[in-house]
Image: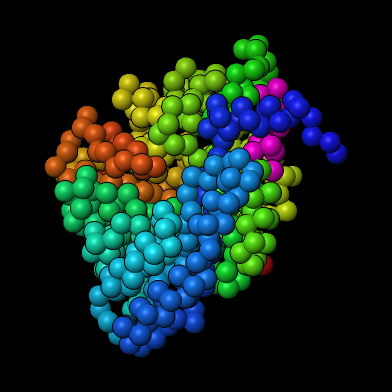
């Protein structure tokens, strides 16, 4: 089929005026062969394997950018959850492995490396406990490493002991990076129903069900979606809105599919998935909140916001799934507060509250993301916040997550500045009536009835 001049002009406008990019090309790398009882040997194996496997990742991505004219915002690597390979060694402090991951990331020239992670939804092993205990130091002493812990799943329920432990870990991680606006906590996420193939940070890991090395691509395009919806008259029905979203999502995802195929071919590794999430940035015009307001909400957070977000999320999936041979990852609409200029504006104006954000997470990916709360917030309050979000994921059989930043030394109305893709986070008020009983009961929130699918 011939490409028309109109299609060429449309693609050029999407890139030059509407912030179309591939948010990330992420290479997933298995480290299962790197386990060793000696920490020094394991660190050498990990560094050598990552830098050898991904040695051409950045140059290949740069070449694809030049040839196809579509920017690739981030080049990333995800690895086997470190707790799995660290089980082979007796060391209590696993942060040296994070330092090794950071050094490998620096050598490769990538933006982030995910996988300082553990999966503890049904119980915590010795290596899991050691890894979680090492997270604050690991994130305080590295620049590019991201950490994630899965504490819940629909099949297992919620590990409430892990929920409290992670709340305490988040607070300590923020404390150890206070001088840098508590940025360590911005690289730490707690999950329910974590996926094995997400290209997005901070929650990317390379799951045990994956090939030795794969290429996963995350598309973006809120600016493109907003521009498309502006073409509709205000009298257009929601059915018309949904059709326009589907049509635009197909175009955005098709670009990601093309780049994914080419990257995997040139790098000689398996093609993984295209994650068709709408991922915002702090840049003007690249906002999911702005899309919701174009759909018709007066200000994001106001009545109707959850409905508009549900429509957007569903239509993006319907349009995107036809454009790729393999859709996966998180695939929806991200609503990180600090990374979305429209979300920040809505928060500052009082339209968007933490409680409304929680309601919105029931219909989108991923969850309560990049939210700063007052520095004196207790671990029990954060544990309650995590537990609420995990319950949404477990009961609704969806991926949800919490990435919350206790703003040590700051109060409501102050602002944390992370820079780059992580953006700027206004400190939001949080309900202080969590109490101190629920978080300390421990045990496991049982798996719901809908987990029985065999």
Whether residue 347 can be seen here:
yes
Kindly identify the residue that appears in the image at 59 percent across and 37 percent down.
313
Kindly identify the residue that appears in the image at 21 percent across and 47 percent down.
180
Side of 451 where 437 appears, left or right: left
Q: List x then y, in percent, for residue 251.
A: 69, 37
* Quadrant (top left/top right/bottom left/bottom right) for the N terminus: top right
Residue farthest toward the bottom in the current orientation of the protein: 37
Identify whether 432 is placed above or below 28. above
> Which residues fall within the magenta stretch?
240-254
Kindly identify the residue that appears in the image at 56 percent across and 49 percent down.
218
Identify whether 171 is placed above or below 315. below
Identify whether 253 is placed above or below 243. below
Q: List x then y, in percent, for residue 168.
A: 24, 58
Q: List x then y, in percent, for residue 93.
A: 25, 75
Whether residue 289 can be seen here:
no
Residue farthest toward the right in the current orientation of the protein: 1
């Amino acid at each position: 089929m011939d490409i028309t001049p109109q299609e060429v002009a449309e693609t050029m406008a999407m890139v030059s005026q509407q912030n179309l990019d591939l948010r990330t090309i992420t290479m997933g790398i298995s480290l299962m062969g790197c386990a060793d009882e000696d920490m020094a040997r394991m660190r050498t194996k990990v560094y050598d394997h990552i830098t050898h496997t991904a040695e051409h990742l950045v140059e290949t991505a740069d070449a694809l950018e030049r040839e196809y004219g579509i920017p690739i915002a981030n080049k990333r690597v995800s690895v086997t959850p470190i707790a799995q390979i660290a089980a082979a060694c007796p060391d209590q402090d696993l942060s040296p492995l994070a330092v090794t991951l950071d050094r490998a990331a620096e050598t490769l020239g990538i933006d982030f490396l995910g996988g300082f992670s553990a999966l503890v939804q049904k119980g915590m092993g010795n290596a899991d406990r050691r890894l979680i205990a090492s997270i604050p130091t690991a994130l305080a002493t590295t620049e590019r490493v991201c950490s994630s812990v899965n504490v819940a799943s629909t099949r297992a329920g919620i590990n409430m002991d892990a929920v409290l432990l992670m709340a305490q870990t988040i607070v300590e991680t923020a404390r150890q990076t206070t001088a840098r606006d508590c940025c360590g906590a911005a690289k730490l996420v707690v999950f329910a129903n974590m996926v094995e193939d997400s290209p997005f940070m901070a929650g990317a890991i390379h799951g045990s069900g994956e090939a030795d090395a794969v290429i996963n691509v995350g598309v973006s395009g809120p600016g493109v979606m907003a521009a498309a919806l502006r073409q509709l008259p205000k009298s257009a029905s929601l059915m018309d809105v949904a059709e326009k979203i589907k049509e635009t999502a197909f175009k955005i995802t098709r670009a990601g599919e093309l780049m994914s195929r080419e990257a995997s071919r040139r790098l000689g590794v398996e093609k993984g998935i295209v994650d068709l999430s709408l991922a915002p940035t702090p840049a003007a015009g690249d906002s999911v909140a702005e899309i919701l307001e174009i759909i018709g909400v007066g200000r994001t957070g106001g009545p109707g916001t959850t409905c508009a977000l549900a429509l957007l999320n569903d239509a993006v999936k319907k349009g995107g799934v036809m454009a790729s041979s393999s859709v996966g990852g998180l695939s929806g609409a991200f609503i990180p507060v600090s990374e979305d200029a429209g979300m920040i504006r809505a928060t500052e104006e009082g339209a968007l509250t933490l409680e409304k954000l929680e309601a919105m997470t029931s219909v989108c990916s991923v969850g309560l993301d990049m939210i700063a709360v007052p520095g004196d917030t207790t671990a029990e309050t954060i544990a309650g916040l995590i537990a609420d979000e995990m319950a949404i994921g477990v009961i609704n059989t969806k991926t949800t997550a919490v990435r919350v930043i206790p703003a040590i030394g700051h109060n409501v109305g102050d602002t944390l500045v992370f820079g780059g893709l992580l953006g700027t986070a206004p400190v939001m008020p949080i309900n202080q009536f969590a109490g101190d009983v629920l978080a300390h009961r421990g045990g496991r929130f049982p798996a719901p009835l809908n987990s029985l699918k065999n």
